[in-house]
Amino acid sequence: MTTVDVLGVRPVNPVARLLTALLIAGGLVLSVDWVSALTALALELVLFFAVGARLRPVLTRGAVIAVAAALTAVTILLYGQPSGTVHWHFLLITVSDGSIALALATFLRVLAIALPSVILFADVDPTELADGLGQVLKLPARFVLGALA
């Protein structure tokens, strides 16, 4: 018999959540364009709601990540590699077509990498994660205890 939570969704093994977040992050770290990051972000949002994530927690946690992503994008915008038409220049700050595109791509990549991690691990019980690491992935006891701590 399988257990079902309040939303009618079966609980997902924390190791599956961990591997999913690593898979998403690994693919996005290797790409630099904004199209793949936007596509991943759109698919992630659809999947979050398909598995029963509630809107309020997603928006609350997503807002914090969006602020961090925006700060990262501003840094890239101001100090990124200048290329193309230069729109504004002051001392070390150069805003160009290339830095704008890179800032947009960075913003979307940070969102697409961080959102799954925060949403997937918001309600993970550390004991269940340690059990999964030991039983599913057969990791050494010291590593499992370190993850539990």
Image (cartoon, rainbow, N blue to C red):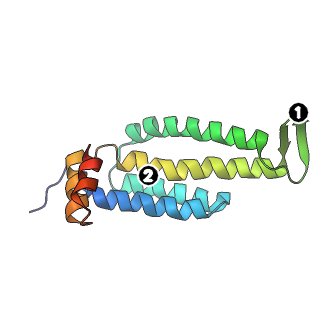
Residue drawn at the location 56% of the way across and 39% of the way down: 66
For the residues bearing labels 2 and 1, Cβ distance under 8 angstroms: no
Q: Is residue 8 visible?
A: no
Binning the other alpha carbons within 10 Å of mark 2 as few (below 14), some (14 to 19) or many (20 upward) gives many
**Residue 85 located left or right of residue 35:** right
Residue 92, given in percent of the width and then of the height, sits at 84, 36
What amino acid is labelled 2 in the image? Pro
Residue drawn at the location 80% of the way across and 50% of the way down: 81
What amino acid is labelled 1 in the image? Leu
Q: Nearer the viewer, mark 2 or mark 1?
A: 1
Mark 1 element type: loop
Give the mark nearer the N terminus: 2 vs 1: 1
Residue drawn at the location 44% of the way across and 35% of the way down: 60
**Residue 121 located left or right of residue 111:** left
**Residue 60 located left or right of residue 29:** left
Which one is in front, 104 or 30? 30
Residue beneath disc 1: 91
* Badge count: 2
Residue beneath disc 2: 116
Q: Is residue 38 visible?
A: yes
